[in-house]
């Protein structure tokens, strides 16, 4: 194998092992920055050694051993000035002469908890939601700062500062790199799921910019969801979120036309929906329900998505069931956005006037005051009710509120259609 190919193979292995390495190292050295540096050091050592010796049978254990040795050397160079360093060095020193096989066994025993602990730390509520998303993509997803910046249409220095602040917050709060105890886990898990879904939603419906969707962000969120499901196989809402993301992601190929324009759900070519993702989503949903989580917020949203996934044609959609599911979702996750989506479901199940009645009740909701989907939904109800001048006004208002260029063009086209 040529040197370039060998290096590419080593880098591919490192991408797979990177999050596991950082998780284990962060737990040992209690410092995210230092854990990242040690993981990178291990890669450099591997790039020098593996072309001569070959890729070891368990590359993760080899990399961890190399990183541990580097950690010991660094601590000794600092002459163990702090007591914490003395304790860490003593623990690491005991393992210095252990074989790779022993290290492999240790990693296999503990790595699930370590990786899960890193996820819970990166998504800790003490960190702002935006910083949590950036840090999670950096540590768990392995994205570079530039890649995260491009995904969120932010400046690279802005993303870098978010990550730096998040790491400082972790250090200042002296957070433990571990899974919370059972009493705390439920509340903390909600934060983890929120961050993953935030990442997914930014990919599924970009809040700003020229592109309506960013599939790479959706893919990262799905990958994080699959990791979490593997680490927490008895948490129903983890599977509910995974089901929701898999089913929604199945529509991405049909969600935009050849020119990048938005294609509404009812107009999408369902032959382009990814059937593998739908099957994965339905399987995850069944798992969530089997675990007793059918009424969880994410599981209910996944059940809503499943109604669309099971309809081979738009006119076969069971809108009455969707309306009933929104009634349940409204009880467990009350919010103006859920109420708006419920109004849409009612308009499809029981006619546009039913939707207008519900949406008019939301007119004073502060959270929806500058929310483009509200006038967009009202415009659709009015259009289907034959009240075209009023519909045009609503579509134009919605176009003025959105920050996404593709969505604005779609709304203006609907406004123009009211004059034909």
Image (cartoon, helix red, strand yellow):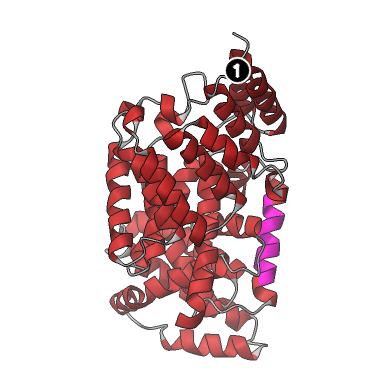
Residue at 53 percent across and 72 percent down: it is 187
Q: Quadrant of the N terminus?
A: top left
Please state the horizontal and vertical placement of residue 263, each as a whole percent of the image: 48, 25
For residue 121, side relative to residue 393 (left or right): left
Residue at mark 1: 413
Does the magenta-highlighted stretch encompass residue 71?
no
Residue at 58 percent across and 23 percent down: it is 410
From the image, give the main secondary structure of the stretch colored magenta.
helix
- Eyeballing the image, is 61 above or below 78? above
Query: Is label 1 in a helix, a strand or a loop?
Result: helix
Please state the horizontal and vertical placement of residue 92, each as a whole percent of the image: 47, 84
The magenta region covers: 159-169
Please state the horizontal and vertical placement of residue 402, each as a whole percent of the image: 67, 33
Question: Depth check: 211 or 372 in front?
Answer: 372
Question: Depth check: 382 or 290 in front?
Answer: 382
Please state the horizontal and vertical placement of residue 85, each as a whole percent of the image: 60, 85
Q: Residues within 10 Å of mark 1 (few under 14, many from 20)?
A: some
Residue at 47 percent across and 64 percent down: it is 42
- Eyeballing the image, is 61 above or below 15? below
The answer to whether residue 213 of the structure is visible from this angle is no
Q: Quadrant of the C terminus?
A: top right
Question: Depth check: 413 or 124 in front?
Answer: 413
């Amino acid at each position: 194998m040529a040197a370039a190919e060998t290096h590419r193979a080593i880098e591919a292995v490192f991408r797979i092992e990177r999050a596991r390495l950082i998780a284990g190292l962060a737990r040992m050295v209690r410092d995210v920055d230092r854990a990242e540096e040690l993981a990178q050091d291990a890669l450099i050592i591997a790039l020098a050694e593996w072309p001569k010796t070959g890729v070891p049978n368990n590359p993760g254990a080899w990399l961890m051993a190399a990183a541990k040795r580097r950690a010991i050397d660094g601590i000794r160079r600092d002459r163990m000035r702090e007591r914490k360093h003395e304790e860490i060095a003593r623990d690491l020193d005991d393992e210095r002469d252990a074989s790779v096989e022993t290290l492999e066994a240790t990693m296999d025993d503990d790595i699930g908890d370590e990786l899960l602990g890193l996820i819970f730390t990166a998504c800790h509520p003490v960190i702002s939601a935006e910083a949590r998303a950036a840090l999670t993509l950096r540590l768990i997803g392995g994205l570079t700062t530039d890649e995260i910046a491009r995904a969120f249409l932010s400046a690279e220095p802005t993303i870098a500062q978010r990550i730096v602040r998040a790491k400082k917050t972790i250090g200042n709060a002296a957070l433990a790199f571990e899974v919370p105890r059972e009493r705390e886990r439920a509340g903390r898990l909600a934060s983890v799921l929120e961050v993953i879904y935030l990442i997914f939603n930014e990919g599924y419906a970009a809040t700003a910019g020229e592109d309506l969707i960013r599939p790479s962000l959706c893919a990262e969120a799905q990958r994080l969801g699959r990791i979490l499901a593997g680490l927490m196989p008895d948490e129903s809402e983890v599977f509910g979120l995974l089901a929701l993301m898999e089913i929604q992601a199945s529509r991405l190929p049909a969600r935009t036309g050849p020119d990048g324009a938005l294609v509404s759900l009812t107009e999408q070519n369902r032959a382009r929906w990814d059937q593998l993702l739908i099957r994965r989503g339905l399987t995850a949903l069944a798992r969530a329900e089997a675990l007793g989580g059918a009424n969880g917020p994410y599981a209910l949203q996944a059940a809503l998505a499943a109604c669309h996934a099971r309809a081979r044609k738009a006119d076969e959609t069971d809108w009455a069931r969707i309306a009933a599911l929104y009634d349940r979702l409204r009880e467990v996750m009350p919010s103006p956005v859920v109420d708006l989506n419920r109004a849409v479901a009612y308009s499809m199940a029981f006619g546009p006037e039913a939707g207008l009645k519900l949406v008019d009740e939301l007119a004073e909701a502060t959270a929806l005051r500058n929310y483009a989907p509200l006038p967009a939904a009202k415009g659709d109800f009015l259009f289907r009710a034959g009240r075209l001048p009023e519909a045009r006004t609503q579509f134009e208002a919605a176009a003025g509120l959105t920050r996404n260029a593709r969505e604005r063009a779609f709304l203006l086209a609907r406004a123009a259609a009211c004059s034909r």
